[in-house]
Image: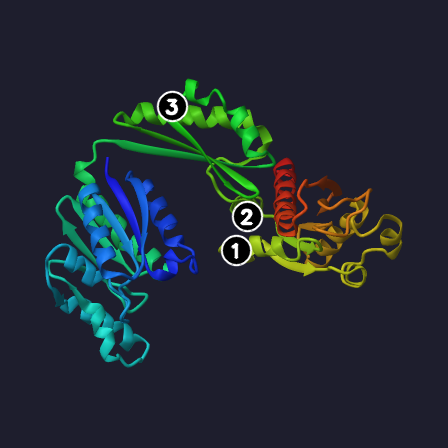
């Protein structure tokens, strides 16, 4: 098995002023190709500490991915630290210099004298062209360890990992791999993590060759299964059985058998079912529209969004009856049904979805406490209203739960209708 480590550099990372999302992204991709990530490390802009850490990693790991410190400024030290750690000189790499000049020419920008610093690589390093920024990356072999140095800018790093690093790892280490790694994921909503654990408490005894894990990204939980071995056929059989058994234990709380997000699952279902949607939101404040339009190609199914926060907007834009609001209130099944009907009518969509609730931390009553949400769904042959209660008092948590709850209800209704 390939042992991998990830190193992030920069004072801003160590001090917490910038969140290290790079390491998480890299770790996911390395795991997907069978590498075993053992450590994530962080070092500030200090030459000696950085060189020392690189030396340590090179002894322990087969693969190292290092991000940051490749720019033109005085605190960009990664290339120099690598040269110091492994006793080589920095040299101007012609291919790296050419890629920098090409990037500047592409945007009709003039290079400064300091920009060429980015083409100074350790002797023996191979450049990784950066088509999305000025700083080239590079590959440097240190004994058993193949080191990949990448820019810290996330959009540049992400492209370079996918387009250069992963293919190089597979080509360089491919023949050395003697194990097979298979993964399966289930996404679910509506159960706390502890209860998910209880429902799957027999997993280890039933599937001893499959490792079970859980990732909670509020309010969704991803159940992760990993099988590692040398017999692919038996691993495929066992992990498929493990996935099926787990889905049966968790029931209709599972919304994706592929580990997809709720919005990705909904998008696939809407396209497959040829359903279009118009959304009217009150308590969720546009969050549902945001989630639905995060998916590329959302124009195929998403037609309309209205954040009708006030009662006046519900009446004048959606056509909600003033009598309904006066009799039942804005947070009621009756009101969200009329909101959903209005969203469907205005947009010309085949389905309308609406929310109204009390996200908190204030505004609740004995009858309708903080955490109450009503969801309306309008379809061609029926209009439905639901009421649920979240135990949380924090506003953002409730908005997130309300949005996913509404999408999950929509998902179930489309499945029933198809």
Q: Quadrant of the C terminus?
A: top right
294 is higher (above) or lower (below) than 239: below
- Name which quarter of the figure residue 220 lies in: top right
The percent position of residue 410, horizontal first and vertical second, equals: 64, 43
Instruction: Quickly name the residue at label 1.
Output: 294
User: Which sits earlier in the primary sequence, circle 2 or circle 1?
Assistant: 2
**What residue lies at 49% left-to-right and 26% top-to-bottom?**
246
Lower sequence index among marks 2 and 3: 3
Checking the image for residue 363, the label placed there is none
Classify residue 87 as left or right of residue 49: left
Label 2 with label 3: CB-CB less than 8 Å: no
* Direction top: furthest residue: 205
**Where does label 2 land, which residue?**
263
Q: Toward which corner of the image does residue 30 lie, by quadrant?
A: top left
Does residue 373 lie above or below 152 as drawn?
above
Query: Mark number for residue 238?
Result: 3
Residue 359 located left or right of residue 204: right
Residue visible at 76% across and 44% down in the picture: 369
Q: Are marks 2 and 1 in contact (CB under 8 Å)?
A: yes
Decide: few, some or many residues near mark 3? Use Cα within 10 Å; few <14, some 14-19, many ≥20: some
């Amino acid at each position: 098995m390939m042992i991998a480590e990830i190193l992030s550099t920069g004072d801003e990372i160590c001090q917490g002023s910038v969140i290290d999302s790079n390491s998480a992204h890299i770790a996911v991709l390395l795991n997907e190709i069978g590498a075993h990530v053992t450590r994530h490390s962080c070092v500030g802009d200090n030459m000696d500490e950085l060189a020392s850490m690189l030396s340590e990693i090179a002894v322990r790991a087969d693969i190292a991915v290092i991000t940051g410190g490749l720019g033109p400024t005085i605190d960009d030290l990664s290339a120099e630290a690598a040269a110091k750690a492994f006793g080589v000189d920095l040299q101007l790499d012609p291919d790296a210099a050419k890629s920098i000049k090409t990037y500047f020419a592409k945007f009709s920008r003039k290079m400064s004298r300091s920009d060429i610093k980015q083409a100074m690589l350790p002797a023996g390093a191979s450049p990784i062209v950066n088509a999305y920024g000025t700083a080239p990356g590079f590959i440097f072999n240190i004994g058993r360890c193949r080191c990949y140095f990448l820019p810290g800018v996330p959009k540049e790093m992400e492209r370079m990992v996918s387009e250069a690093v992963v293919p190089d790892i597979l080509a360089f280490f491919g023949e050395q791999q003697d194990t097979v790694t298979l993964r399966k994921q289930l996404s679910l909503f509506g159960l706390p993590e502890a209860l998910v654990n209880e429902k799957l408490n027999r997993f280890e005894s039933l599937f001893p060759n499959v490792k079970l894990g859980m990732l909670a990204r509020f309010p969704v939980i991803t159940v992760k299964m990993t099988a590692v071995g040398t017999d692919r056929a038996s691993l495929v059989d066992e992990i498929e059985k493990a996935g099926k058994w787990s889905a049966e234990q968790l029931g209709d709380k599972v919304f994706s058998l592929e580990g997809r997000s709720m919005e990705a699952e909904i998008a696939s279902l809407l396209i497959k079912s040829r359903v279009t949607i118009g959304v009217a939101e009150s308590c969720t404040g546009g969050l549902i529209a945001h989630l639905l339009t995060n998916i590329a190609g959302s124009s195929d199914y998403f037609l309309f969004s209205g954040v009708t926060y006030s009662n006046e907007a519900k009446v004048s834009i959606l056509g909600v009856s003033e009598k309904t609001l006066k009799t039942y209130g804005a947070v009621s099944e009756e009101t969200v049904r009329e909101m959903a009907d209005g969203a469907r009518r205005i947009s010309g969509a085949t389905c309308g979805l609406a929310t109204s609730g009390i996200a908190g931390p204030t505004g609740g009553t004995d009858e309708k406490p903080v955490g109450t949400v009503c969801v309306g769904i309008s379809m061609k042959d029926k209009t439905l209203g639901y009421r649920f209660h979240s135990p949380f008092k924090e506003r953002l948590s409730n908005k997130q739960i309300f949005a996913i709850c509404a999408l999950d209800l929509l998902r179930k209704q489309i499945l029933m209708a198809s």
